[in-house]
Amino acid sequence: MAAQRLGTLLVPVPGLSGITYPPGTTVTVRGRGATVDAFVNGDWLPLSWWEFSDGLREDIADR
């Protein structure tokens, strides 16, 4: 199983379900490189490197 880590969306991203997640959404990220798989409550979001940051931003996590 691939290592997982938390990330934060930097831009709005649509999930496979059709729901668009806003910037600041916490995602579980799998993989490394230019594209990764991310998940929000089981919804899959294929992300490019510029759509998220690794880890949680404290100001967003406190909301």
Image (cartoon, helix red, strand yellow):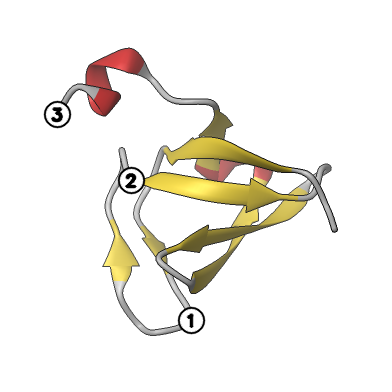
Nearer the observer, disc 1 or disc 3? 3
Q: Position of residue 19 (x, y in %)?
A: 30, 75
- Point out which mark residue 3 bears: none
Q: Earlier in the sequence, mark 1 or mark 2?
A: 1
Q: Amino acid at mark 3?
A: Arg
Relative to 42, residue 60 above or below? above
Left or right placement of residue 54 versus residue 26 in this view:
right
Write the residue at 48% across / 81% down. 16
Q: Position of residue 43 (x, y in %)?
A: 46, 73
Q: Which residue is mark 3?
A: 63
- Asked where in the image residue 61 lies, by quadrant, the reply is top left
Dot 3 surroundings within 10 Å: few (below 14), some, or many (20 or more)? few
Q: Which residue is mark 1?
A: 16
Q: Earlier in the sequence, mark 2 or mark 3?
A: 2
Q: Amino acid at mark 2?
A: Thr
Viewer-nearest residue: 51 or 37:
37
Left or right placement of residue 9 versus residue 22 in this view:
right
Q: Position of residue 27 (x, y in %)?
A: 47, 48
Left or right placement of residue 20 versus residue 6 in this view:
left
- Asked where in the image residue 37 lies, by quadrant, the reply is bottom right
Q: Would you say the residues marked 1 and 2 are in contact, meaning their CB atoms lie under 8 Å apart?
A: no
Q: Which residue is mark 2?
A: 25
Q: Secondary structure at mark 1?
A: loop
Dot 1 surroundings within 10 Å: few (below 14), some, or many (20 or more)? few
Quadrant of the image containing the N terminus:
bottom right
Between the residue at mark 1 and the residue at mark 2, the CA separation in whole angstroms equals 16 Å
